């Protein structure tokens, strides 16, 4: 067995924008006459789609709302996100991730993004950062009904890569996921995909016991060793 594809999370892996998302989520809650609670964003939103985030926060507050209402919240937040990033002179792209993407762009490996973020946000960031040409597929949070830790996004990414290149005959175990959150790591594992946990958002020791591999920075990833493990078909268990 060989490694054929690398599937990247977006927020917290490609772009360091979690503070922006927390700020915009808090703003929306205030606009909806809801008090912002400390720790709520990390509990309900990190690594998950906006839809899952807003649904759970509103449910926690005793509000049960229609899907159309959630759709409007997501739209307002996405528009605010675009404005926020357009005002920045330079996007906060993780240097270690950029270097890995550029390195892998010279290899045979396919790359895709699997995220809870809205597609318009992902496409804007990748294009502005000059990284869009490296990714064969994007699975965004507004395209699927479920959110991480459900495995659906990762399974759809494998399906889309196979649709683009049927001769690839890609299987989940021939992929590697790169994640920074508990929900993301669980989603990849449930899809049958080995996963690297990167300590961008949570401490190393908290991710180490969950992921197949764990690093503080992607620049520390022992790439040749990982490829060798795939070739030996002896993937580490978390």
Image (cartoon, helix red, strand yellow):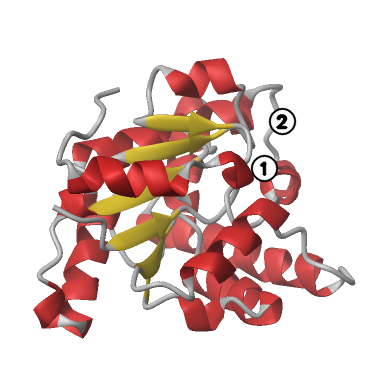
Residue 139 in view: no
Which mark is first along the chain, 2 or 1? 1
Q: Is residue 109 left or right of residue 91?
A: left
Q: Residues within 10 Å of mark 2 (few under 14, many from 20)?
A: some
| Residue ID at (18%, 82%) | 165
Q: Which residue is mark 2?
A: 36
Residue 45 or 193: which is nearer the viewer?
193
Q: Is residue 70 above or below residue 36?
A: below
Location of residue 131 in the rendering, given as x and y in whole percent from the top left corner: 59, 76
Residue 82: quadrant of the picture: bottom right
Q: Is residue 84 above or below residue 210?
A: below
| Residue ID at (58%, 45%) | 218
Location of residue 92 in the rendering, given as x and y in whole percent from the top left corner: 77, 58
The answer to whether mark 1 and mark 2 are in CB contact below 8 A is yes
Q: Which residue is mark 1?
A: 29
Q: Is residue 170 left or right of residue 27?
A: left
Q: Is residue 196 left or right of residue 161?
A: right
| Residue ID at (20%, 56%) | 2
């Amino acid at each position: 067995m060989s490694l054929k594809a690398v599937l990247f999370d977006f927020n917290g892996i490609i772009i360091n924008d979690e503070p922006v998302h927390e700020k915009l989520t808090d703003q929306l809650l205030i606009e909806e006459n809801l008090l912002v609670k400390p720790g709520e964003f990390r509990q309900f939103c990190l690594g998950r789609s906006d839809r899952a985030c807003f649904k759970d926060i509103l449910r926690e507050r005793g509000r049960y709302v229609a899907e159309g209402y959630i759709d409007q919240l997501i739209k307002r937040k996405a528009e605010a996100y675009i404005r926020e990033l357009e005002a920045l002179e330079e996007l906060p792209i993780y240097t270690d991730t950029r270097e890995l993407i550029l390195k892998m762009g010279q290899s045979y490996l396919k790359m895709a993004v699997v995220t809870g973020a809205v597609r318009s946000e992902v496409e804007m960031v990748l294009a502005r950062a000059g990284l869009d040409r490296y990714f064969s597929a994007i699975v965004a949070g507004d395209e699927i009904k479920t959110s991480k830790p459900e495995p659906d996004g990762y399974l759809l990414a494998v399906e889309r890569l196979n649709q683009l290149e049927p001769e690839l005959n890609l299987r989940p175990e021939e992929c590697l996921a790169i994640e920074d959150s508990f929900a993301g790591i669980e989603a990849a594992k449930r899809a049958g995909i080995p996963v690297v946990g990167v300590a961008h958002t949570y401490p190393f020791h908290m991710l180490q016991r969950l992921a197949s591999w764990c690093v503080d920075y992607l620049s520390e990833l022992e790439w040749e060793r990982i490829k060798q493990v795939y070739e030996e078909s002896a993937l580490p268990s978390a």
